[in-house]
Image (cartoon, rainbow, N blue to C red):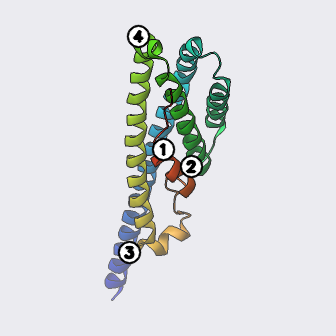
Amino acid sequence: MGYVILAVVGLLVIVLIGIYNGLIKTKIRVDEAWSDITVQLKRRVDLIPNLVETVKGYAKHEKGVFEEVTKARAAMTGASGVAETAAADNMLSGALKSLFAVAEAYPDLKANENFKDLQAELVDTEDKIQAARRFYNAAVRDFNTKVKVFPTVIFAGMLGFKEREFFELEEAEQAAAEKPVDVKF
């Protein structure tokens, strides 16, 4: 009888260790994915001053667009947490759309090698940001699922594991992101 109780307790300890380790592994995956997003966002923020200066040389009268890009870049560098970063990212994406719309109005600028290189780097960075977001959201989905399913849900709360936020657009920002930029000459 004593061996049976000892075996059950031992099995329970092994199950708890497995649950805890699984939660830790998925939490680390979420943290790694978030780090990937911040690295790519930083890369984009670092590219923007060069892009803005290149466009400024051609479009001196487009002051409002440059101020919007600068403001959005500042919001991005000061953002913390998933929701604030997502909002700043959406603001910056909109500002960059406006900047590229201005650039479209200047054929000489579009042909400028510096501008083309910067634009290509920014497009590459945007693609990497999208991939990092998808990876992050997949990791968050896995973690949140693990935190909510039985029997992990019982122990997750006791061990202090809480659901994580997805990196997503708000409804108004989603509509703005899907709307094409008007280019007028």
The amino acid type found where label 4 is placed reads Glu
Sequence-earlier tag: 2 or 1: 1
Q: What is the x, y in percent for residue 180?
A: 45, 42
Q: Which residue is mark 3?
A: 12
The amino acid type found where label 2 is placed reads Val
Vertical comparison of 10 with 52: above or below:
below
Secondary structure beneath dot 3 equals helix
In the rendered structure, find residue 97 and report the number of the disc placed on it.
none
Mark 4–mark 3 Cα distance, whole angstroms, equals 65 Å
Q: Which of labels 1 and 4 is toward the front?
A: 4
Mark 2–mark 3 Cα distance, whole angstroms, equals 36 Å
Q: Image quadrant of residue 122?
A: top left
The amino acid type found where label 1 is placed reads Trp
Q: Which residue is mark 4?
A: 113
Q: What is the x, y in percent for residue 137?
A: 42, 53
Left or right: 63 in relation to 33: right
Q: Which residue is mark 1?
A: 34
